[in-house]
Image: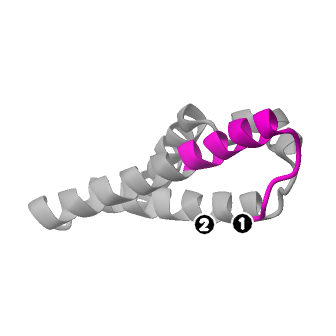
């Protein structure tokens, strides 16, 4: 990730936003991998792993473009844990719909 510019307070806040987004993605990837290992190749867990992996790549690419703490703070909703989880749920549903066709 690029070094952030801004006041110390802005940088600390922006770093928390990045850390929280990465934590949500990584924790869910690890959770789904653990469930697959424990319960086998259950499609629900595979869909979750695929969704969070995809989101993680997209978020990583987007976060690499932001070097201003204030820009990241202003876009914090984009990287919020609730939005990430909601997006993953929508992706999982899209995967299920695609398989039904």
In what element is the residue under mark 2? Answer: helix
- Above-or-below relation of 83 to 41: above
Answer few, some or many: residues within 10 Å of disc 2's Cα (few below 14, many 20 plus, some between 14 and 19).
few
Using the numbered discs, state the Cα–Cα distance from disc 1 to disc 2 in whole angstroms: 6 Å
Residue at the image point whose x is 62% and y is 36% from the top: 80
Stretch of the chain drawn in magenta: 2-21
Q: Nearer the viewer, residue 7 or 65?
A: 7
Left or right relative to 88: residue 34: left
Q: Is residue 36 left or right of residue 76?
A: left
In the image: residue 77, left or right of residue 31 = right
Tag of residue 61: 1
Residue 3 magenta-drawn? yes
Task: Report helix, strand or loop for mark 1.
Answer: helix
Q: Position of residue 75 (x, y in %)?
A: 80, 38
**Residue behind mark 2:** 57
Asked if residue 42 lies left or right of residue 30, the reply is left
Whether tag 1 and tag 2 are in contact, CB under 8 A, the answer is: yes
Viewer-closest of 12 and 85: 12
Neighbour tally class for label 1: few under 14, some 14-19, many 20 plus, Cα within 10 Å: few
């Amino acid at each position: 990730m690029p070094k952030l510019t801004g006041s110390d307070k802005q940088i600390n806040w922006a770093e928390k936003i990045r850390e929280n987004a990465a934590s949500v993605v990584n924790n869910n990837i690890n959770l789904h991998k653990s469930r697959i290992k424990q319960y086998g190749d259950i499609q629900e867990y595979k869909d979750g792993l695929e969704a969070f992996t995809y989101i993680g790549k997209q978020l990583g690419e987007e976060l690499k473009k932001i070097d201003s703490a204030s820009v990241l703070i202003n876009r914090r909703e984009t990287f919020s844990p609730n939005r990430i989880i909601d997006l993953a749920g929508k992706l999982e549903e899209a995967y299920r719909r695609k398989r039904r066709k």
